[in-house]
Image (tube, rainbow, N blue to C red):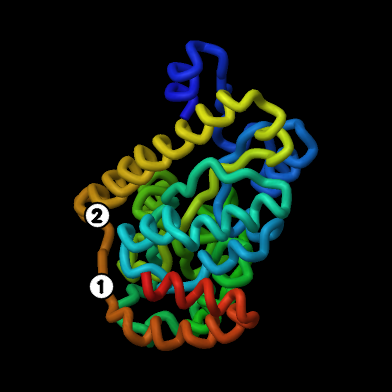
Amino acid sequence: MARIANEMSDGRVEIQIYPAMQLGSEKAMIEGLLLGTIDIVVTANGSATNFVPQLGILDLPFLFRDREHMYSVMDGEVGEKLKISMEERGFHLLGFYDAGVRHIMTSNTPINSYEDLQGLKIRTMPVPAHIASFNAFGASAVAVDYGELYGGLQTGLVDGAEAANTNYDLKKFYEVAPNWAQIGWIILAADAIMSEEKFHSLPEDIQEILTEAGRRSAILERQAYADSDNSLLSVLQDKGVQVTFPDPAPFREASQTVYDEFVRTEEERDLLNAILNE
């Protein structure tokens, strides 16, 4: 995004990048958009849901059939409706990114079936729909800070966690949780956003450049993430990870209670039906 915006503007737009939460937690950075201390944030969709409740629809389990389905939804009518909801809350969407297909890691018990997960303490992101999902799956969702997850797995504070191939490999979670169940319980979205007020304070041609840079960066990011995700499974197996493929059907069936809990209004039901029928 930074490169494209800089090139398109002949150097008038310079985006300075601060990775690895140098500017604070996701919640603090989103608040920074509204305060005007940060211009652009890429955040997990679950974090943005605290500010734009309508985004919670994207955090339901087994919502998307595959990545292509998710991209079609985010780039279509549903994505446009969610963009409008963001604008009503003071945020301007630059692009929906891919944050990975999520699976289940465990320290001691391989997950070969739905029954193997019953009663295990599983760390999830602090997103209500994620917590409800693992409780519905028969596990016990546990809140552990992501920075403390490796130690929590090592000491037995939790029995497992959910993650994508990418962060499972990057954070070397396989050292303390070598069982890796390919369940694909959710495909996470990430939102590239800026302040609506800040966006519209810029000259019209810069707004157009940022819009195009956001669109093109999303295409590039999705491909890069998918390529990384897809290439890692054999790498992990070479490292001694025990990969299993439990039947997703019982997990999907258990997810219905999560849908019943989080899809309550007519607007939410319309959004859900539009996604499922995409």
Residue 106 visible to the viewer: no
State whether residue 120 is above or below residue 90: below
Q: Residue furthest front?
A: 204
Residue 235 at what x, y percent from top left?
23, 48
Pick the front one: 228 or 115: 228
Q: Residue at (25%, 52%) from the top-left corner?
A: 230
Q: Residue at (61%, 27%) from the top-left corner?
A: 204
Under circle 1, the secondary element is: loop
Tell me, for residue 81, which label it has, or none. Answer: none
Residue 245 at what x, y percent from top left?
25, 72
Q: Residue furthest right?
A: 35
| Alpha carbon distance from label 2 to label 1 | 12 Å
Q: Please, what is the three-letter code of the amino acid marked with disc 2?
A: Leu
Q: Please, what is the three-letter code of the amino acid marked with disc 1?
A: Phe
Q: Is residue 31 left or right of residue 42?
A: right
Judging by the rendered image, the residue that carries numbered circle 2 is 233
Q: Is residue 244 left or right of residue 137?
A: left
Judging by the rendered image, the residue that carries numbered circle 1 is 245
Quadrant of the image for the C terminus?
A: bottom left
Residue 194 at what x, y percent from top left?
64, 39
Q: Is residue 243 left or right of residue 140?
A: left
Q: Is residue 124 left or right of residue 100?
A: right
Under circle 2, the secondary element is: helix
Total of numbered circles in the picture? 2
Q: Residue at (46%, 31%) from the top-left corner?
A: 213
Q: Residue at (71%, 54%) from the top-left corner?
A: 88
Q: Which sits earlier in the primary sequence, circle 2 or circle 1?
A: 2
State whether residue 196 is above or below residue 127: above
Circle 2 residues within 10 Å: few <14, some 14–19, many ≥20:
some
Q: Quadrant of residue 195?
A: top right
